[in-house]
Each structure stands twice: as structure tokens, then as C-alpha cells.
Amino acid sequence: MEESCSVSSLPSQLSSRIEAVTGVDPELRPATKPQFGHFQSNVALRLAKSEGRPPREVAASILERLDLADLCEPPEIAGPGFLNLRLRSSVLAAWVTDQLADPAAGIEPAGESEVVVIDYSAPNVAKQMHVGHLRTTIIGDCFNRVLTAVGHRVIPQNHIGDWGTQFGMLVEQILDEGTNPDDLDLAAMAELYQRASGHFKTDEEFAAAARQRVVALQAGDAETRSIWRQLIESSLVGFNAAYSRLGVLLTDDDLAGESTYNDDLAVVAEELESTGAAVIDDGALCVFVEGFNAPMIVRKRDGGFGYAATDLAAVRHRVRDLHADRLVYVTDARQGDHFAQVFAVCRKAGYLPDDVVAEHVGYGMVLGQDGKPFKTREGTAVPLTALLDAAEEQAAPPVALAAIKYADLSTGINKDYVFDVDRMVQTTGNTGPYLQYAHARMAQVLRRAEADGLGEQ
């Protein structure tokens, strides 16, 4: 294999040859620094423990029996006994050429395709998307694209907040003011919510009417449901505009709001109680799981259901009806304990079989220049549109988008980061615009090469 190599076979060929000599998987990894070559293996260090010999001695013994001359320069032993492999220039050139010609850009397909359900974004109806939705949307979209690229069937689920007692206030305020819901955008709905909230706190008659409106919504009252649906439709216009600006894949086909599971909540409660997974405690239906200080309340003493019941119903649906092999929830890291308990309860209830993986991907917060959670002067979350506008004031939309998304994705997922537009849009350093600039320069070189008749070389 001097002049060519299939896109995905080179690392596996190297691994196979080392394993043939050592008898164990070399766990070949890309080198951490250029001076270490292209690939590294710690196989000698692992074997040294079982053989009772110094790692460098084991490494030397491996190299005496290892033939990689057609692929690599002479391998080197580094540090305590790492094997460093540097590809021959001709092999590297052939490998890169194959990758350039491959529609998958050298991405190896997954060994076995899975159905992966990813829960992300999840804005609230009648409220503007804010800085808190930035990371879940970008990271979730990244998982969607990567997992799809390697051959998995990805089912996005946008679990929007489209149900709850707040809609009683909103609908009652709309009727009280005589407002046409179709005339409300997200900003106007946010203002409406503030008025309704204030009205609820200061006017007992309005508060009583709002509570009754919640009952009407739950009972399916035609007028109430019509206004509720209009609020959802108007909110989706704003959500989709944000998704379009961010360049993410979410569409209305991916919607799976809280209301989706309304009819399942009583069924879930009945199943949990009948199987003994849940018990009545102080009038509430609870599930006790070892390792958690408090039980999960599925049904409250007043007969109502909370968010936990909805989350259980969602897991049940995604495994039973969507046939998920893996569930991925992308939310703020602070929700980690909640989802750990949800998964534990679902295991106990049988909603999560042993062969289905469920994981919570928690991310850090977006901070302001003061190092504190990014908020407006009034102390509220910064609207997502304001962040995008701020970036587009500094750069053209495609560059601004690259700046924001790269700044987010290049930050350790568990780490907080400061939203600094000036730094994000710089064309030097570890930024999105720098990568775009480098790509544009490389494309220019290739165009000139092709113009000079070097396209095939």
C-alpha cells in the first residue's frame, strides 16, 4: 500500500498489524502533538504490567517483530514506552486524496445502525427563546448531524413547553383585553405574559378566572383550546425564524411538546401503581428509587400531574413507539440529577429495558462579561435574537453564525464560557471566522492549481 489506501482502512490496518504481534488491541489514537507523529499507542505500557518487564523493553520487543515499512517511517519509542507512528509522505498523500474524493470525507460508518432519539432545544410557548436555548440547540443539532453522518437513524424531539397553568393566565388576559392572538409575535407575547402575571397577583377575581381557564383548557373547551393553539402557532413562527438563523435542522415535524403526552399521564400512573413500581405516600403517587433522597412524585395529592410524569411518558413513548435504541437529552447540566432519577424510575418501571441506553448530556452556562450568568440589565435572560443581532453587527451573517457556533462547540461541554462577540468574530486565533478564512485561502490555492493544469495532481 505505497500509493493508495482506502479512506477508512489505514488506522485499522495499523491496528491489525500491531495486534497480530502483541495479541491485544493497541488502542491506536491520533497523536496529541505533531512531534509525536500521526498515531500513538500505549500497548507496551499495558503489556508491561502483565509481563513484569519495563515498558520500554516491551516496546522494543514489539518493534523488533513489527513490520510497518510500507506504511510508516521507522516507529519510535517515546517517554515511558509509547509507540509513535509517522506515516510515509506518499501514504499520507494517498490517504488524504482518498478522503477528499469520499462523499463521507473519511468518516467511518457506525458498526451497527441505531435509532437515536435526541431531545433538545425545547423553548416555551409564548416566551422568547433566550440565551439558555443557545447551547441546547447548537449542541443537539451537532449530535443530530454527526450521528446521522455515521449511519444512525436520528429522531429529533423538540419538547416545547406548550402546557401548564400559565396558559390559563394568558388566555384569560387575551380575552380580557380583546387581543387577537394572531397579531402577537414572541416579543408581544412576552409582554402579554408580564401583564397577565401582574394581573394575576393583584386581582383576585382575575386570578380565579385564570384558574378556571386552566380547567377549561384541560377539559377541551373550544374557545380556550382555539386561543391556546393560536399561541402555539404564533410561537412556532418565532422559533422557526431562530432555527433558520442558526442553521439547525429542527422543523415542525420534530415537535413533541408537553401536551403530546397528556392522554398518557393517567395511563402511566395506573401502570406504575398496578405493577408496584409506585406507591401512595401522603396522598401522592410516588416512586422510590435507591440512591435518591426524595421520591419522584408522579401524581400529586390533588390528582394533578407534574413535569416528572410527562418525562416518564416521553421515555415510554420513545422506547415503545419510536423503538429507540438510545435516548439523548441535551439540557443544562443543572438538570442532571432530575434526569438521572427519571432514567432510574423508568428502569424500575420497565420503560427502559437494559438494552436501551439513556444519557443526559449536560452543558455549562453562557456568561456575560462580568463572569455571571448572561442577563439583561433588568435581570432577565438575554433574548436569543439579541445575541444573534449583536454578532451580525460585527460581521456578515454567515461569519457571525460561524463565530457563535464555533465558540460554543469549541468550548468543553461541561464548561461555562463568556459570550464575547469581539473575540468570537476575530479572524485570528481559535475562532470560527479564522477557520472560514483558512478554508477560503485553501480553496483559492486549489482553484489556481486547477487553472495551472495541476488539478489531477
Image: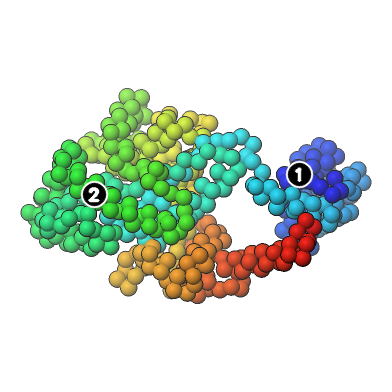
Label 2: how many Cα within 10 Å (few below 14, some 14–19, many 20+): some
According to the image, label 2 marks what residue? 230
Quadrant where the image shows the N terminus:
top right
Q: CA distance from mark 1 to mark 2?
A: 54 Å
* Residue 364 placement, left or right of 260: right
Q: Which residue is mark 1?
A: 6
Q: Is residue 220 above or below residue 187?
A: above
Q: Is residue 422 above or below residue 138?
A: below
Q: Amino acid at mark 2?
A: Gln
Q: Front-most of 402 and 47? A: 402
Among the two numbered marks 1 and 2 on one chain, the one whose residue lies closer to the N terminus: 1
Q: Amino acid at mark 1?
A: Ser
* Residue 409 visible here: yes
Identify the residue at image location x=28%, y=53%.
Answer: 234
Front residue of 232/209: it is 232
- In this view, the residue farthest toward the right is 64
What is the x, y in percent for residue 200? 15, 57
The answer to whether residue 279 shows anywhere in this view is no
Q: Nearer the viewer, residue 94 or 348?
A: 94
Tell me what residue is drawn at x 47 percent, y 59 percent.
364
Q: Give SS at disc 2.
A: helix
Q: Residue at x 20, y 60 (%)?
A: 192
- Which residue reaches farthest top? 274
Q: Residues within 10 Å of mark 1 (few under 14, many from 20)?
A: some
Q: How is the image coloured?
A: rainbow
Figure check: 152 above or below 73? above
Give the side of residue 126 with respect to residue 175, left or right. right
Q: Position of residue 333 (x, y in %)?
A: 45, 54
